Amino acid sequence: MDEGIRQWIARRRNTELVLVLFAVVISAFGHAAAHLAVHDELPSGLLAYTAGLGALAVGAHLVVRRFARYADPLILPVTVLLCGLGLVLMDRLDQAYAERFPEGHYQGVAVAPGQAIWTVIGVALLVGVLLVIRHHRVLQRYVYLGMALAMILLMLPAFFGADAFGAKRWIRLGPLSVQPGEFVKVMIVVFFAGYLMANRDALALVGRRVLGLALPRGRNAGPVLLVWAVSLVVLFYQRDLGTSLIFFGVFIVMLYIATERTSWVVLGGLMAIGGAVAVAATQYHVKARVAAWLDPMSIYLPEDQRPPGVISEQSAQALFAFGAGDLTGTGLGQGHSYLIGFAGRSDFILATVGEELGLLGVTLVLLLYVLLIWRAFKIAMTVSDPFGKLLAYGLGTVLALQVFVVAGGVTGLIPLTGKALPFLAQGGSSTVANWLLVALLIRISDAAGKASTLPEGNATILTPVVRDPAARPTGG
C-alpha cells in the first residue's frame, strides 16, 4: 500500500478517535452538570458512566479501525454524542419523575439504565455487522427474502400486537416490547435499493400523459401502488402515522433518485395525501391527533367546548417548555418538562432540550442530525456502485424523515406521530435499529473511501438511465 494512502487512513481514524473521546467528555460534563443543578453534588456514578460510555465508544472505534478503516470518520462520533446526550437527559428526567410519583408508579420507573443496556446491544450489533458483512453488495443476494420477512414483521402487530398510547405497533415478548417497524425501515430500504437498481430503466419509461403529467406504465407503477397500500394498512390497523410516512416517503425519494422523474414524486404525493385524508376521516386516533395539532391549547377549555379527541395536554406543555427555554435555556436540571408526563422520555424529549438548553441547544442537536444525514448523502455521491448509492441515499432519507416527523410533531409543525427521536429518545427497538443503520452507513462509506484512494475512485457515478426516446415525451 502506498505510504500516502496509509497516512490518509491513519488521519481519518485518528480524527475519529479524537472526536469519539470528545463526545464522551461532553456527555460526562452534561451528566455532572444536571446532577449538580438538582442535588448540589457530583453524581456518585459519574466515573462508572464515563468509563462505560468511553469503553463502549472506543471499542466500536477499534472495530471500525480494524474492519472498516476507509470509513467516514464523523458517523461514529456523532452517533456516540447523540446517545450520550440522550442518556444524560433520560437520567435527569428519571430523577424528576422519581421525586414526583410514588414508588411503584409506572412513571417513576427509571428508564436510563434500560436504555444503556439497549445501547450496548446496538453497539454489539454494529460490531457484528462489520465483522460479518465485509461489503455492502452482499445484501443484494437477499433483497426479496428480506422484503418478505419485513412484510411479515410489519403486519405482526396488527394481529398479535399490544395497544399502547393509541397505537398498535408493539409486540410483547414477556417483559419486553419490540417495535418491528423500526427494523423493517432498514430492511425495506435494502429491498428498494435492490429493486430500483434492477428496474430503474423500466420505471423511467412513460406510459401516458394525463393533465400534463407524465405517468409511468401501469405494470411499472405496481410497486408504488403496493407500497402505498401497505402504508395505508399499517396506518389503518396499527394507527401508526409515523411509520407509514417514513415507508412511503423513502420509497418515493429513492424512486426519484433512480429515475429522475418528478412525475413519480407528484403521483406519490397525491396518493399519500389522499390516503392520509381518508384514514384521518375514519380512524378516531388519527383524527384526535390532527385536532390536537390544530388547537393544542383547547385542552384547557371546558370539556364540553373542546374539539372531539383532544384529551392530552402534552402538545401544549411542549410549547410551554420551548417558550420557557428562550435562547439559551434554563440549564440542565432546571426545567419543568417532566410536566409533559411519560412522553418526556420518548418523542417529547426534544422539549426537554428546548427548555433546558434553549433554542441554541435544539439547533445544535438538529445540526448533529443534519451532519449525520449529510454524511450519508455524501457517501452516496462517493460510492461507485448503483446499489450502494441507492442504499446510502435511502438510509439517509429514513433518518431525515424520522427526525422530521418527530421534531415537527413536538414543535407543532405537523401532527404528532409517536416515533422516537433517533438515539436521543428512550426506545430499545429504535436504538438497536438505528445502530444497524449506522453500521450499514459505515460499511458503505468504507467501500466509498477505498474507491476514492484509486485514481478513478471519484469518477464512477450512477449510470444514467437509458430511455427509449420514442417512449419519453418532451417534459415531465
Image (cartoon, helix red, strand yellow):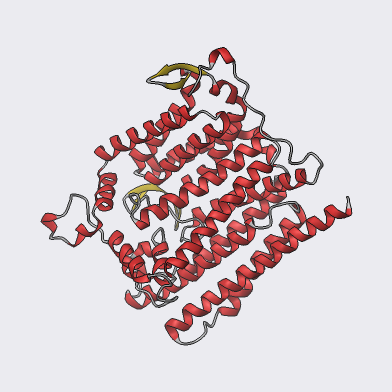
Residue toward you, 128 or 8: 8
Q: Residue at x 57, y 55 (%)?
A: 371
Looking at the image, which residue sits at the far bottom?
40
Q: How many marks?
A: 0
Residue toward you, 395 or 231: 395
Residue 150 image point, x, y percent = 51, 38
Looking at the image, which residue sits at the far front?
474
Looking at the image, which residue sits at the far right?
2
Residue 358 image point, x, y percent = 42, 69
Residue toward you, 422 or 472: 472
Residue toward you, 260 or 258: 260
Q: Is residue 317 left or right of residue 201?
A: left
Q: Residue at x 44, y 82 (%)?
A: 37
Residue 57 image point, x, y percent = 65, 64
Which quadrant would residue 301 be assigned to in this image?
Answer: bottom left
Q: Residue at x 12, y 60 (%)?
A: 302
Residue 457 visible, this orientation: yes
Q: Is residue 409 left or right of residue 72?
A: left
Which quadrant would residue 48 be assigned to in this image?
Answer: bottom right
Looking at the image, which residue sits at the far left?
304
